[in-house]
Each structure stands twice: as structure tokens, then as C-alpha cells.
Amino acid sequence: MSTATVSRPMANSLTTGKLPRGSTWMILVGSWVIFGAVFAILAAAGVTKDFNIVGAIFFGTVLFDVVIYLTSLLVEGARKATDRLVTSLVATAFIIALLPLVSLAWTVLVNGLARFDITFFSQSMRNVIGEGGGALHAIVGTLLITAMAALISVPIGILTSIYLVEYGRGALARGITFFVDVMTGIPSIVAGLFAYALFALIYGPAIRNGFMGSIALSVLMIPVVVRSSEEILRLVPNELREASYALGVPKWLTVLKIVLPTSIAGLTTGIMLAIARVIGETAPLLIVCGFTTSMNYDLFSDRMMTLPVFVYTQYTQAAGINAQASIDRAWTGALALIIIVMLLNLIARIIARAFAPKYGR
């Protein structure tokens, strides 16, 4: 008499007792959505003045820590649940560190959208007293002054870093490194006073123009470019240099054809960090460029407005019945400045990827 064998599906020990892939992200986003809805209801009911995005993210992340631990404890066991809890706590610390940035970006975005229109980006403040007007003159001034500062600073900074890494030895190299470190920590207003004193000795105390602002920003920008470029150039493997020397390539050509192309992505990132460092400076530009309500495309003639000074003047001049219009322009100017920095970083990433060396098998 034959016995029928009943086949049963075998359980896969490698997948049994595991949370589905992507469940961590779903729990995190779901926790944020839950507390986002709670704070939205509180704001709609008038309990809180505005929607608190920082509170929603913070309490949502805390809820995520609890839910991911309990869920993993029920499905995967105590050992895996403890591992997930520690991992979530590390992620929580990272999210908490980002909360000031999130708060800043959210506040600028919410308040800056009030005047984020075509008029703001196509008109200046010439003959505008109350509502209306724009920041075209400030945007143009910021781009021109920053571009000239980068044109001055980038060659000097990169050549200095090449000297320190490839050629510099002895007391001169140590002296340059010391003074670069000192320049890194100088207050921005000192750079503005230096540029003003330099040009005032030649042209008199009434001199104000955009080129003076470029000189002041370059004083702040050069040490950042030098330090970042120096660290990047030191990361290039010496084997690449030695291979080039073994083929009889002179040192200057090795630097030009091997070292710089290999580190182009890092150099571009360092340059963008330096630009982001100086593009929002207000004090030196207020001293050497002054402020104006009219368009000025000439760096070497007359006063020139920049976005940081525009934000400062609009906020400090907010008074009377048109105070809200000035405050709205100030917030939108700050939002425009952030967008410009983001676009410059995006362009830098594209350039770095396009010119980076291609490695094939």
C-alpha cells in the first residue's frame, strides 16, 4: 500500500522574520506625515501661530524610533530590534543636526514667496517708495562683484596651493601656510576696511565702486580656496606623479595634465565653497560699494547694490505704512540669494562631472 507524500512549501530561513524592504523609510515618512497633520490641525485651530515644520520633523522622528523598535521586536526579535533602534538613534541625531537648516530654509521660503514674482526680478528700486519695485540691480551687482572676486581669487588660490603641495619647502612654505591660516579667520569687515583704505589712498575717501567690493571679497575668498585646494591636491596618489616622471614628463606638465585633471571635482567643490562663503557678506560691501536704487553694470564706476546689502537696507528701512512691503522684499531677496548659491553649486557639479577624467577598464 503506497503512502501519498504531501509536499509542503519550505520556509526560507534567510527571509523569514525580516521586515519588508523599504519599511524603514515608509515608517519614517509615515511618522512625519502623522505629526505634520497634527501640527497642521493645531495651526488651523489657532493653537499655534504657524505650521511648525521643525516640531513635526522632530516628534515624527521620535515616533519613528519607537515604532521601528516595536515593529522589529515583534517581527525580527530582540537582537535585530536593538540593532535597528541604535541605527535609528544615529539617524535621529543627524536629523536633529539638520533641524536649524530646515527651519531656516522653510522660514525663508514661506516669507520669500510673497514677492517672488516677475516684477521683483525685472525691476530695480529706482523711484520706488512704497510697494512694488524689485531687486534686479542687486542681483546684477551680486553676480558681477562675485564673478570678479572669483576671477581674482581662483588663480591665486590654486597656484598657491600647487606651490605648497608640489614645490614648497622650508621657511617660505611654512610662512605662507601660517598667513593663509591667519587670513582664514579675519573678520569680514576687516577685509572691507582694507579695500577701502587701499583705494582711498589713491582716489580719495569718497571712492565707492563694485571693484572695491571684489577686492574685499577676494581677501576673504583666497584663503578658503588655498586651504581646500591644498587638501584636494594632497589626495592625488603619488604613484600617478611617479609614473608620469618615469615616462620623462616634466614636473610642470605632470601637474597640468595629471594632478589638476585628477582633482578637478574636488577643486570645483572647494571653489564653490569659497564663493558661498563670500556671496552673502554684507559688512565689507556696505563699506566699499555703498548702496543705490539704480542699475549699474560698471564695476569701476559709482556705487553698486548687492543682494546682502539690499536685504539689509530693506529690513532696516521698514517703517510706516509701507513697512510690510520692505520686509517682503527683504525676505524675497534672501530667498533669491539662496537660489543663486544652489544654482552655482549645481553648475559646479555639472562642470566637475564633465571635465573629470574618464576611467575605463
Image (tube, helix red, strand yellow):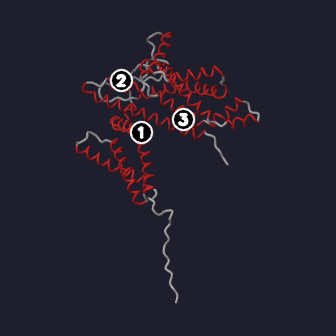
Please say if the residues under marks 1 and 2 sit with CB atoms less than 8 Å apart: no
Single out the mark in the foreground, 1 or 3.
1
Above or below, comparing residue 171 to residue 227 in the picture: above
Q: Secondary structure at mark 1?
A: helix
Q: Secondary structure at mark 3?
A: helix
Q: Amino acid at mark 1?
A: Ala
Q: Residues within 10 Å of mark 1 (few under 14, many from 20)?
A: few
Q: Mark 2 = which residue?
A: 313
Single out the mark in the foreground, 3 or 2.
3
Q: Residues within 10 Å of mark 2 (few under 14, many from 20)?
A: some
N-terminal label among 1 and 3 = 1
Task: Give the left or right position of residue 339, taking residue 154 as reference.
Answer: left
N-terminal label among 1 and 2 = 1
Q: How many marks?
A: 3
Task: Give the left or right position of residue 353, taking residue 208 as reference.
Answer: right
Single out the mark in the foreground, 1 or 2.
1
Q: Position of residue 118 (x, y in %)?
A: 38, 35
Q: Position of residue 74 (x, y in %)?
A: 39, 59
Using the rendered view, name the quadrant where residue 231 is placed: top right
Mark on residue 269?
3
Q: CA distance from mark 3 to mark 2?
A: 31 Å
N-terminal label among 3 and 2 = 3
Q: Secondary structure at mark 2?
A: helix
Query: Residue placed farthest to the bottom in the image?
Result: 1
Q: In percent of the image, x 70 and y 35: which residue is there?
A: 241
Along the line of sight, which residue is nearer the eye, 180 or 65? 65
Mark on residue 97?
1
Q: Amino acid at mark 2?
A: Thr
Above or below, comparing residue 332 to residue 168 in the picture: below
Q: Amino acid at mark 3?
A: Thr
